Image (spheres, rainbow, N blue to C red):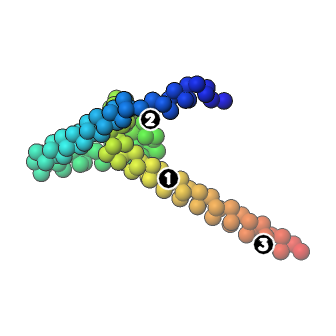
Amino acid sequence: MFDEPKLNKMKEYLASPEFAEFSRQQEEADARYVTECDEYWDALSYDEKLMVFSSVVKRIVKGDLKDRGTYRYVLYDVFGFDMDSYGIGMQCGYMDLHNSVVEKDELEQLRRKVRELESLIAAQQDHKENYK
């Protein structure tokens, strides 16, 4: 099933000092990006912040609630971003938000179906009792 030599080589790399250094550099870059985003936000005027907020929420509502799109659909088709947005969306928490919206809606759909089935079962039982 798995190519054992390749799997072992990957395990070795993940345990290597080179990967540890790469991970450290990535964490530093991520922290810098978060700081830059916060500084960008802080530099906006109140009206600019409202415009950004409105634009972002409008697109999330369209992609997640109206279109019921996937994470990638919302990023690429609704926002018009490229593949680099995938990790940024994860970093800022959008993937968690997207998944919670989708999971909550799917759960509600499932609950509706269960209620429908319960109603059908109850109606069938009533029908059987009426014809005994």
Q: Residue at x 74, y 68 (%)?
A: 123
Element type at mark 2: loop
- Mark 2 or mark 1: whose residue is earlier in sequence: 2
Q: Quadrant of residue 86?
A: top left
- Mark 1 or mark 3: whose residue is earlier in sequence: 1
- Per the image, the residue denoted by label 1 is 103
Amino acid type for the residue under numbered disc 1: Glu
- Per the image, the residue denoted by label 2 is 15
Q: Toward the viewer: 75 or 12? A: 12
Element type at mark 3: helix
Q: Are marks 2 and 3 in contact (CB under 8 Å)?
A: no
**Taking 8 as reference, is 69 left or right?**
left
Q: Horizontal and vertical percent for residue 18?
A: 36, 29
Count of marks, rendered view = 3
Q: Are marks 2 and 1 in contact (CB under 8 Å)?
A: no
Give the farthest residue toward the front.
17
When the figure is inspected, residue 56 is found, relative to residue 116, above or below; the finding is: above
Amino acid type for the residue under numbered disc 3: Asp
Q: Toward the viewer: 36 or 3? A: 3
Q: Residues within 10 Å of mark 3 (few under 14, many from 20)?
A: few
Q: Toward the viewer: 12 or 56? A: 12
Element type at mark 1: helix
State how far apart marks 2 and 3 are (Cα): 65 Å
State how far apart marks 1 and 3 are (Cα): 34 Å
Which mark is on residue 126? 3
Q: Residue at x 68, y 66 (%)?
A: 119
Q: Horizontal and vertical percent for residue 29?
A: 26, 36
Q: Split into 4 quadrants, where in the image is the C terminus?
A: bottom right
Amino acid type for the residue under numbered disc 2: Ala
Q: Residue at x 40, y 45 (%)?
A: 95
Q: Horizontal and vertical percent for residue 34?
A: 24, 43
Q: Are marks 1 and 3 in contact (CB under 8 Å)?
A: no
